[in-house]
Image: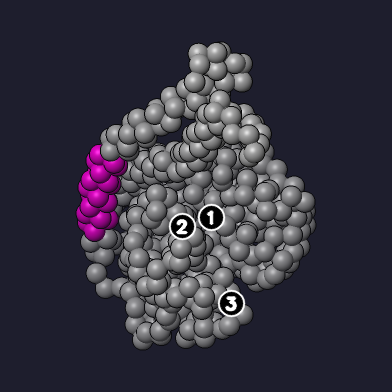
Amino acid sequence: MVKVAVRKRHPDPARLSLFIVAFLVGFLVVTQLRGQLASPAPGRSTLEDARLLSDLIEANNRLRTEIAKAQQELAALRGNSSTDVDTLVSELNRLKAINGLLEVSGPGVEVELLGNPEPFEMVDLVNELRNAGAEAIAIGNPQTTLRLVYRSSIGGGRGWLVVDGTLLAGPYYLRAIGAPETLLRTLERRGGLIALLRYTHPDWVITVRPADRLTLPVYPNQITFKYARAADR
Amino acid sequence: MSLRFFSRPAVLVALVITGFALAAAYRLPLQSGGADRGTGDLSAVVAQLDAEHRRLQAQLAEVQAERDRLRAQPQGPGLSGLLADLLNQQVIAGTVALTGPGVIVVLDDSPRRPLRGEDPTLYLVLDSHLRDVVNLLWEGGAEAVAINGERIVATSSIYAAGGVIVVNTARLAPPYEVVAIGPPELESLLRSPGRLTQLRSRVQNYGLQFSVRRAAEVTVPPYKGGFPTEHLQW
């Protein structure tokens, strides 16, 4: 930046011009800076659009898989042979794995959290894993590992979490099965939740590492329905 | 002003910087114009994918309906047990519509306008508010939950993107109606002052709309998507 000292008592036209130029430069630089500060907004929305796009593509692929499974089951029901029974059993097991009622294994990521999160921060972290494409998730500490299911809840307070009724003290980890690269990239993205948590809690240590093979236990509770019943179609 | 004035080093530097700043300031609007065009293309692709998504959803619903019709027909003793197990797992997975007593929670943006210089998001329902409500519903013993007709399943996420809240790839707009089947105590749990404190403070300070009512019977629709299992071994 050009600095010019203007002495009030001696108005020199050359210095005055220089002052005006300096003022103009300052003005333009500020305008430019503000423009640049504002520019992450369109950038971010494009990034979010890209995320929506990739989510939709993935969702459509999943739908195709689901249609194929339902068609197989349909064919099995029509055929009613022993191989058809196998198809039904395989679909049953797939659903049990999704529902947390079978032990599952596979590649994925492990998120280690040395800190004392509030329940909502852990809820956000689990949500982030699901959004990143996790196929199965477990939360735990060095003593306990708990499989998360659709109705899992995280309560308690800062530094003491209650996960589905089980008290869980830190240090915490989350294990998620899915494409390690995608999970890692999504979790570690700039401006993502983990970046935000690291920024808000500089004393925490959050490590995300890929894993070739993780094994997640069966959900320990019974999933029962006391109030809900199948709606008539 | 003489020509000598322009040959002074300080003035030269100032002029060069002015030139740079002018050029840079001029280029800025052109760049954002380009970005706008890019977003336009993207939304066309999104619309196309959306249409395909709806078509696949309809196809899945059709195949599932036919499968359910066949299942309902009398089967041999071995098979009927297997089919009952399958239905039970589908109920847990969330692919079956459920009905029962429960609560209806409605969240909406504030009708107030943000004051000058205030963060406008203080007046909006955020994805985190919905996550907190859903988490509390599960804690209170809810058995099934849907937001604006989107069933919450094991792989569902609730996140903000492009100014909307996305659940199961569906872009939702306010008001957000969270329907849950579960015990009557859900109502008092959602109303208790010590819970949902962030949401409650936005209701109090910024006029966010939040209401809870118990319902004798609510219905949650089935999940219409697929489950990712590419990396899962069992």
Q: Is residue A70 above or below residue B72?
A: above
| Image coordinates for residue A222, horizontal then vertical, percent | 56, 69
- Foreground residue, B78 or A189? A189
Q: Which region shows up in magenta?
A: B42-66
Please say if the residues under marks 2 and 3 sit with CB atoms less than 8 Å apart.
no
| Image coordinates for residue B229, horizontal then vertical, percent | 47, 44
Residues indicated by labels 2 and 3 sit on the same polypeptide chain: yes
Mark number displayed over residue B195: 3
Chain at tag 3: B
List the residue tagged with mark 1: A127
Residue at image location 27% in from the left, 60% down from the top = B68
| Image coordinates for residue A207, horizontal then vertical, percent | 70, 43
Look at the image and tell me whether residue B45 can be seen.
no
Residues indicated by labels 2 and 1 sit on the same polypeptide chain: no
- Between the residue at mark 2 and the residue at mark 1, the CA separation in whole angstroms equals 7 Å
Please say if the residues under marks 2 and 1 sit with CB atoms less than 8 Å apart.
yes
Query: Magenta stretch containing residue A67, yes or no?
Result: no
Give the SS element for disc 3: loop
Give the SS element for disc 2: strand
Q: Amino acid at mark 2?
A: Ile
Q: Is residue A196 above or below residue B127?
A: above
